[in-house]
Amino acid sequence: MQRKSTPVTWRFKGVSDALDSSTAFDGAMAALTNLVPDPTTSRLWQCRPAATKVFDLNAPSSVGPFSSGFSSGFQHNYFNGTGGFISVYRVIGDIVYGMAADSNFSGQDAPFAYDLATNSALLVAGSINATTLPNSPPTAGAWTPPQMALIGTKLMVAHGGFTGAGGNFIGWFDISTPNAPVWNAGNLSGAIQFTVAPTGVAQFFNRAYYLYNSANPAVIFSDVLAATVVTNASQVLTFGDNVPLTALGSLALSTTAGGIVQSLIVFKNVTTIYQVTGDEALSTTNPLTVNSLNVATGTLAPNTVCNTPKGLAFVSPDGVRVIGFDARVSDPIGHDGSGVTVPFILTSVPTRMVAACSGNVLRITTLNGALTGAPAQEYWYEFDRNIWTGPHTFPASLIEPWKATFIMAPSGITGSLWQSDPVQTLQSTFVENGSQLTWTAATALLPDTDQIVNVCITEAQLDLAVASGIGNISISLLDQAATVIDTVTIPPSTASQTLWGQFVWGQAQWGGGAAIALAPYQLQWHRPIVFARGMFTASAGSALGMKVGALHLRYQVLRQWINTQTTPAASVDSLYYFTEDGVVYTTEDGTPYQTENAA
């Protein structure tokens, strides 16, 4: 059966939208769910660590004791166990400051703060009442996501829920003392005041730049280090028409002299991107200038605008793009089967997409309208490897980088923040929100042999490091209609795994020694594996030490023409296919029972 067979190796590289890997890159995958690159070896994969809860607005014990020195109107006692949808937050140093729905203030968002370093909630002082708080945004469907930016000691909150009650159109945390924040709300003072709530805010040249979508959309900028003061009526930038402005971002520009120039990026819907450089106070040396960039595109997803090692990333209508340090807008990353674009192009609610980058890992959550029910899915892009992974489970409704990891608010789980690591550590766990994590690796449809005939897989093996306690590893081959041709299982390791903190140092091997050795495992099929187009899937429980490597196959090109019929007619007593050695007859269930010489 091995005569005139050809070895084929499929080393999993990254996820692709390609329906046919014949035109995609080598190692294109339909899914790498809950798998991340092993840092030691190219195209070797390990399990994504589970996210762990760090803060729960619905658990009174998580928010600590409260001072009795303030009246109820001048302190916030953290939701009394009734925290809801988190609409916005920022991580400043080790402290998360944010806004979330609070049943104490019906239909309104209230401020919260949490110290990640000490794992303790912080009391937010200040005047907190119905007139100083914004109305809560919708938890589903299209929305205008609130934005936050730090200017001096004020962490400004641009929130569309401010109605002007009490003259309040913006809010801010005074973090002069970071672990003792004070909440405030108000309006601009000076030559300009808001008449509607701004929809975005960013820091540039130590000024607050606000998106102001009134009848004539504009950007209003404050005085230096005075985020609520606009001294001059000239502190306004307009953009020529009434198309709404959707997002702001900051970008460092490299110069021919080798220096760095800061710029502010203004997104006008999906039509134009503007670059703002200079400052009003530097009219002779670095004047305030506005120019449009080289591509007529933009974004409807303000929460996808984030800084990366390659520039400012955002999700455009045709996929993820990056504005480089030379101010050029890239082509969509992953287009034409080189990666992932379809989940972003066909997102059902563009404004619900979120993204964040920590180190080289860009994480993006979308409501994938290409699938029934438009499920929330998270995809990761690694800039150094130029690969996509996903779709990962446990997508985010909001996400922010913190140190070398991420702080996220999970989609569908209100009132809590979770830490989600992009790589394994010795402390990684694999139970997430009470459920055991599982991983799946699925190839795209394997490359066509261009022989216009079926192929037979006569041998197959998969490189694995099999951990204990994960259940069976299930490997299947599916045809082009996603019909399972056959499935085999590989049992988990029986060796006990050494757990961190539960052994004497020097008296045991981490991971259980041989239990995590990478080795080829033979796939012992139950029937002949004959197909024209096929894809492999492998899945199992996630665990520390579990690794997935290359898929090795032996192809034999048959003389049987391609036939997409997968179920034999009832009147057929047996099936047969041609090999170079003869005709192999099989019963209806595919079991060979006779071989004859070919004519």
Image: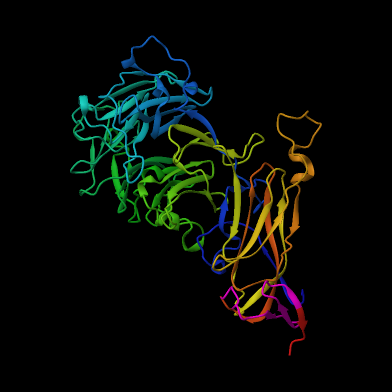
Residue 261: percent from left, percent from top: 40, 40
Please, which residue is most extreme toward the bottom here?
599
- The quarter in which the C terminus is drawn is bottom right
The number of discs equals 0
Q: Is the stretch drawn in magenta largely helix, strand or loop?
A: loop
Quadrant location of residue 515?
Answer: top right
Q: Is residue 266 left or right of residue 195?
A: right
User: What residue sits 50% from the left and 45% below the top?
Assistant: 362
Choose between 232 and 174: the one closer to the eye: 174
Quadrant location of residue 203?
Answer: top left
Please, which residue is most extreme toward the top here?
69
Above or below: residue 318 compared with residue 151: below
Q: Say if the magenta span includes residue 17.
A: no
Choose between 534 and 427: the one closer to the eye: 534
Q: Say if the magenta span includes residue 586.
A: yes
Residue 129: percent from left, percent from top: 29, 22
Please, which residue is most extreme toward the right here?
507
Residue 578: percent from left, percent from top: 69, 82
Which segment did they paint magenta? 565-593
Choose between 74 and 85: the one closer to the eye: 85
Above or below: residue 290 compared with residue 70: below
Choose between 236 and 128: the one closer to the eye: 128
Above or below: residue 157 compared with residue 331: above
Q: How is the image coloured?
A: rainbow
Q: Is residue 61 left or right of residue 2?
A: left
Q: Is residue 519 left or right of residue 439?
A: right
Q: Is residue 117 visible?
A: yes
Q: Is residue 223 visible?
A: no
